[in-house]
Image (tube, rainbow, N blue to C red):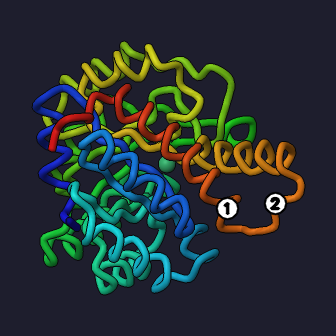
Amino acid sequence: MLVTSKEMVYHARAGKYAIGCFNTSDLEITKAIIAAAEAQKAPVIISTSPKAIEYAGHEVLAGIIKEEATKSKVPVALHLDHGLTLALVEDCLKLGYTSIMFDGSGSDLEHNEILTRQAVEMAHAKKVPCEGELGFLGKAGQNPSKLTNPDDVIGFVQKTGVDFLAVSIGSEHGHGENEALDIKLLKKINSQTGIPLVLHGASGVPDKDIKEAIKLGIAKVNIDTDIRHTFVRGLRDFLDKNPKEKDPREILTKVMNEIQKYVEGRIKLFGSNNRV
Ligand SMILES: [Zn+2]
């Protein structure tokens, strides 16, 4: 069923596990994520970035996810990843998204707070939760991250009313090399607020750090890069071994199986299996 992300993420926060938030840009990845969640009896968030929305077309992508979510046996939320404008937030809410992230982290703190507050008000008017980002998540090997300042946390949460808070604690977008998390910093942030914290750029973070972070308030873990890598690796392996295969449906079914296996492994690591 299609649900908002609020209840599942708050349950995870209380139970010290995390909900997997997996990015999709097409039918195949969407089906694979939901199949994995069903196999593991896990609530799940399916996430669309502005780039994915641009690639597939917003109505088409949202339509596929809503349709698959509605007939699914597990709770599924449809999430906007890194919404950079209020106009995009509005479009998503019109299309029936059940979870929003507004990312004002490119602005200074004051403007981030003002814009995020507006996004939260728009989302809450439709009873949809909204995530904000404090600090800045860079891209591996390109622009460096700015770690979250724990002293800004209480003010940001109170002024904006966000339901979940994305923090910058050492991970980066894109698959970096062995990105250790600043667990001390996470402890400080977690002592400032009771709201669920969100780990972005988790593809390059060692499993033991992810587990440790989940004990310290991380209740939603975003995975994008490794899903795309799994797709390409699966496609390449299959075509190398089966150069005569001509039917995309046969090829993509094998790719979907690989993605499903990967997602099931992440769900088990996050501890959100057997929660439905
Ligand atoms: Zn992110």
Q: Nearer the viewer, residue 46 or 260?
A: 260
Give the quarter of the figure containing the N terminus.
bottom left
Mark 1 element type: helix
Dot 1 amino acid type: Glu
Rendered image: mark on residue 250: 1
Closer to the camera in the image, 121 or 241: 241
Left or right, 178 with reference to 40: right
Tell which of 252 and 223 is nearer to you: 252
Q: Which residue is mark 2?
A: 245
Give the position of the C terminus as an image quadrant.
top left
Number of numbered discs on residues: 2
The tag on residue 229 is none
Q: Are marks 1 and 2 in contact (CB under 8 Å)?
A: yes
- Which quadrant would residue 87 be assigned to in this image? bottom left
For the residues marked 1 and 2, what is the alpha-carbon distance in whole angstroms? 8 Å
Query: Percent from the top left, x then y, of residue 136?
Result: 50, 43
Marks 1 and 2, the one that precedes in the sequence: 2
Q: Residue at (30%, 49%) from the top-left corner?
A: 38
- For residue 153, above or below residue 30: above
Tag 1: Cα neighbours inside 10 Å, few (<14), some, or many (≥20)?
Answer: few
Query: Residue at horizontal 65%, vertical 60%?
Result: 252
